[in-house]
């Protein structure tokens, strides 16, 4: 099937050219060609006139928690948490124990819908449903397939719910890894909650299990709060990263999340092992844990994630810009959040999935988002970042792997209304379960 998209304003960030006012995109099992000028006269199966609408690459969320999708509007915890550990204990560790299969499925569906609706076609998820473990990652992969999206799955291993739960979580990660490692649109990773909720014994048993696996990588929160760093030091390590490296858990497929409180020397370990860093500005601000240093983000070419806060990556890039700006005095260098979103996330997804994802270039997956955007000022190669972050909202069409999943603002093949109705129902059940779990 050859499809030609015509009359497109093409924004292809950090590529060449970055901006085409009126171009064509030829698709056949991926992007075959992006044509800058002239009218192509070859035969295609389908020609779609986009009438000057703006096309961006399908975006990537480099760190998501779809399991927290139904937390929106949830009652505030009774204990009024005042620090990072209390927020985990009183909110997220109650929620992830209260999730069953049905509420997990509703969370996946509503969360993926939120991403797709915002032109995000690849989600690197970190999952936790501590009383529904076996088969939860398969459910994630199945649900993502229904949406036509690329998914990376990992199950959060932790010691906080006892040895058997830890063991079941390790089994779930390994089973999922073995079943899906060859899949084109699924990328298994091995999920660890964080260093401070895993004993040396647990880290060793993970490391031992991985010795016989291939192409594995871990996905873990690192030094999000000072508490994580303090914990590693109290166990005799220089830092969280040093501790993970001591168990041979870091490699070129591994994602380390946050890095707000790294120690000197951590970057050297990450560079040596090839592990990748992902920054999540809105979550860091929300949890009041501090801000990932600018120099670290630049040195590590960090990716951008939302840590469960939302599915809208353009919004995350905008919020990230504003949060950092509010902490800087005039003239201080900031971070280019558009570069994190469009360049570094594309590099991370391309590496993890083993195929080209995240650009509108020849050979890349045909994942794209079409915006019906009428700018009030000139839109050109020099100012696309301003329009993308501060002007464009939700796309009208979204394509993944060459197939429209959203067309003229409607979901194709899936019933959006029933997904949302079910999510509402499951959210109420979940919140009640949480109250019971909470006592
Ligand atoms: Zn997270």
Image (tube, helix red, strand yellow):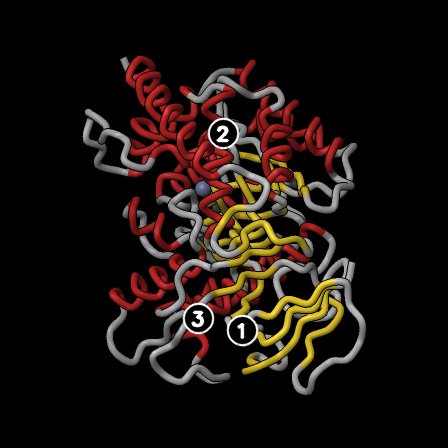
Point out the frontmost of discs 1 and 3.
1
Q: Secondary structure at mark 3?
A: loop
Q: Can you tell me whether the CB of the residue at mark 3 lies under 8 Å from the nearest atom of ligand 1? A: no
Q: Can you tell me whether the CB of the residue at mark 2 lies under 8 Å from the nearest atom of ligand 1? A: no
From the viewer's perspective, is 397 left or right of 313? Answer: right
From the viewer's perspective, is 366 left or right of 420? Answer: right
Using the numbered discs, state the Cα–Cα distance from disc 2 to disc 1 in whole angstroms. Answer: 43 Å
> Where in the figure is residue 25, as x and y percent of width and height?
67, 71
Using the numbered discs, state the Cα–Cα distance from disc 1 to disc 3 in whole angstroms. Answer: 31 Å
Residue, disc 3: 336
Q: Residues within 10 Å of mark 2 (few under 14, many from 20)?
A: many
Q: Residues within 10 Å of mark 1 (few under 14, many from 20)?
A: few
Residue at the image position 68 percent from the left and 67 percent from the top: 47
Q: Is residue 233 shown above or below 364? A: above
Q: Quadrant of ligand 1?
A: top left
Question: Marks 3 and 2: in contact by CB < 8 Å?
Answer: no
Q: Is residue 123 shown above or below 88? A: below
Going from N to C along the chain, the mark reached first, 1 or 3, is 1
The mark total stands at 3
Comparing 309 with 139, the one in front is 139
The quarter in which the N terminus is drawn is bottom right
From the viewer's perspective, is 18 left or right of 391? Answer: right
Residue, disc 2: 128
Residue, disc 1: 51
Residue at the image position 34 percent from the left and 33 percent from the top: 71
Q: Is residue 6 shown above or below 89? A: below
Residue at the image position 63 percent from the left and 45 percent from the top: 148
């Amino acid at each position: 099937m050859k499809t030609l998209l015509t009359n497109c304003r093409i924004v292809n960030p950090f590529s060449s050219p970055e901006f085409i006012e009126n171009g064509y995109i030829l698709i056949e099992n991926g992007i075959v060609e992006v044509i800058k000028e002239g009218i192509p006269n070859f035969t295609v199966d389908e020609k779609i006139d986009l009438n000057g609408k703006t096309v961006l690459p399908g975006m990537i969320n480099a760190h998501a928690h779809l399991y927290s999708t139904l937390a929106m509007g949830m009652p505030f915890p009774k204990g009024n948490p005042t620090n990072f550990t209390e927020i985990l204990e009183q909110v997220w560790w109650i929620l992830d124990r209260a999730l069953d299969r049905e509420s997990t499925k509703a969370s996946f569906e509503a969360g993926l819908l939120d991403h797709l609706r915002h032109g995000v076609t690849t989600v690197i998820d970190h999952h936790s449903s501590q009383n529904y473990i076996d088969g939860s990652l398969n459910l994630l992969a199945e649900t993502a397939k229904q949406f036509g999206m690329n998914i990376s799955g990992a199950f959060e291993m932790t010691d906080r719910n006892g040895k058997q739960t830890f063991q079941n979580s390790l089994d779930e990660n390994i089973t999922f890894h073995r079943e899906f490692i060859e899949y084109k649109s699924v990328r298994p990773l091995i999920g660890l909650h964080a260093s401070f909720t895993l004993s040396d014994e647990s880290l060793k048993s993970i490391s031992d299990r991985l010795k016989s696996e291939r192409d594995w990588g871990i996905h873990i929160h690192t030094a999000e709060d000072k508490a994580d760093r303090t914990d590693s030091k109290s166990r005799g390590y220089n830092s969280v990263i040093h501790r993970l490296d001591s168990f041979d858990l870091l490699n070129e497929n591994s994602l380390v999340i946050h890095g707000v409180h790294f120690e000197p020397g951590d970057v050297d370990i990450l560079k040596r092992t090839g592990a990748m860093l992902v920054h999540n500005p809105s979550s860091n601000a929300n949890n009041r844990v501090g801000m990932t240093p600018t120099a670290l983000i630049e040195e590590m070419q960090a990716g951008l994630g939302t840590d469960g806060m939302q599915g809208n990556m353009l919004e995350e890039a905008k919020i990230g810009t504003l949060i950092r700006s509010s902490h800087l005095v005039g003239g201080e260098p900031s971070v280019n959040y558009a570069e994190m979103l469009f360049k570094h996330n594309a590099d991370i997804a391309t590496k993890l999935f083993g195929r080209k994802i995240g650009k509108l270039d020849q050979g890349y997956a045909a994942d794209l988002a079409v915006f019906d955007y009428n700018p009030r000022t000139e839109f050109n190669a020099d100012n696309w970042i301003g329009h993308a972050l501060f002007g464009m909202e939700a796309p009208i069409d979204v394509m993944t792997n060459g197939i429209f999943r959203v067309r003229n603002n409607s979901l194709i093949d899936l019933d959006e209304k029933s997904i949302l109705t079910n999510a509402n129902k499951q959210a109420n059940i979940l919140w009640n379960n949480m109250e019971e779990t909470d006592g």
